[in-house]
Image: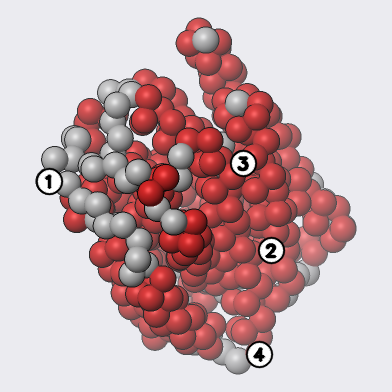
Amino acid sequence: MPKINSTLVSEKTKKAALLVVALAVFTDMLIYGLVVPILPKYATSLGASQTAIGFLFSSYAITLFIATPIFGALSDKIGRKGPMLWGLLGLGTATILFAFADSFWLLVVARSLQGLAAAATWTAGLALLADLYPSDERGKIMGIALSGQAAGTLLGPTIGGWLYQLGDYRLPFLVAAGLAFIDGLLRLFLLKDVPHPKSEDSPSPFKVLRNRQLLIITGVIIIGASVPSVLEPTLPLHLQKVLSATPGVIGLLFAVPTLAYGLATPIIGTMSTRIGYIKAIIIGLIMVAIALPLVALPDMLWLQVCALAFLGISMGMVLAPCLPQLADISQKSGINSYGITFALYNTAYSIGMMIGPIASSTIADAFGLTISYMTIAAIVLLYMIFLTITSRSQS
């Protein structure tokens, strides 16, 4: 992949690209989160079990997993702009399909198409930022981009829950389709001056997978992605039972960890550059292992809010340092193919999103919510120990 000389790119162009990527990630996660407070109830009305609902949420990640390597290679070969526009088209189509789905399997198709769209948008967008910004700025820039993710995830459940109560099942998705159209216009106009490098000679994904450091960070991303997806199929029903929460209140509660995540990630991005990405990740894993079981314990609203806020900060501490760490490993290893590198990020993220809902739903069905979250927290601690040992052996 031809490298862009970041010193020759104007600050205006860099900021336009950052804005486009942050908005793209925001829109994707807004529509992703829109369904959280309403989809379990709607799927149940169509005859779906708790395990089936877990599969429904995981179908997004399954498609993301399959499509990400393809779009990673494509974005290296043809440039970043095309895949970002394709992703938007897929997202708009999925949103309309959600609005008119009248069977469980149509919901699965719509959720899967969302994953396909995210594969294009995320891979090309993150690679574009790595193209334009040098290593010493990536921690901060990736943190800002992830704030777009957090803002979308924050507003998605909130908007979805309240629009559902104000109108009907279709209203949230029709509003989201309008937002996707606006986002498409912004991508067209703001990306017109961004450099458009492309290459016919992109490295094989299997070459990237032979890099042990990249694979270790991939494991961290899987864990970081699984944490919010653990909550999606299980926590809404728990909140209904324990706190008698309505869909609107559930949407607001899901906003708490994402708000904390969004506010924390720019700070975490800058801090992780100073203390080292690996050290920041280790601290984040410890925090997640403590925070996740706490989410299942409160029987009072304010305690639930505190537990979810702590979990959101913990997720930011895990994921924010991973993006610049991947880019740095890729650059130092001579790969310099950010499309493939961030395809690895998306692939790992999708694995986490597949594992999380299925694991939490299955364990919760058998042993209850608290045991489910404690089991996942124990796995997080084990990986933290492994990361600590391997990072010391490499230093």
Q: Nearer the viewer, mark 1 or mark 4?
A: 1
As measured in the structure, the alpha-carbon distance from the residue carrying label 1 to the one carrying label 2 is 43 Å
- Percent coordinates x, y for residue 306 in the rendering: 82, 51
Q: Is residue 174 left or right of residue 243?
A: left
How far apart are labels 3 and 4 at the CA level?
Answer: 38 Å
Q: Disc 1 and disc 3: Cα gap in Å?
A: 33 Å
Q: Nearer the viewer, residue 93 or 183?
A: 183
According to the picture, the residue beneath numbered tag 3 turns out to be 269
Circle 3 Cα neighbour tier, 10 Å, few/some/many (<14 / 14–19 / ≥20): many
Residue at x 73%, y 63% (from the top left corner): 253
The tag on residue 255 is 2
Query: In the picture provided, is 124 more to the left or to the right than 236?
Result: left
Q: Is residue 378 above or below residue 11?
A: above
Q: Nearer the viewer, residue 224 or 229?
A: 224
- The answer to which image quadrant residue 250 occupies is bottom right
- Disc sitting over residue 68 in the figure: none
Callout 1 secondary element:
loop
Neighbours of disc 4 within 10 Å: few (<14), some (14-19), many (20+): few
Q: CA distance from mark 1 to mark 4?
A: 51 Å
Q: Residue at x 12, y 46 (%)?
A: 200
Identify which residue is drawn at 23% across, 28% down: 207
Asked if the residue under mark 4 is in contact with the one under mark 3, i.e. CB atoms within 8 Å, the reply is no
Residue ID for mark 1? 200
Distance (Cα) linking label 2 and label 4: 19 Å
Mark 2 / mark 4, whichever is N-terminal: 4
Q: Secondary structure at mark 3?
A: helix
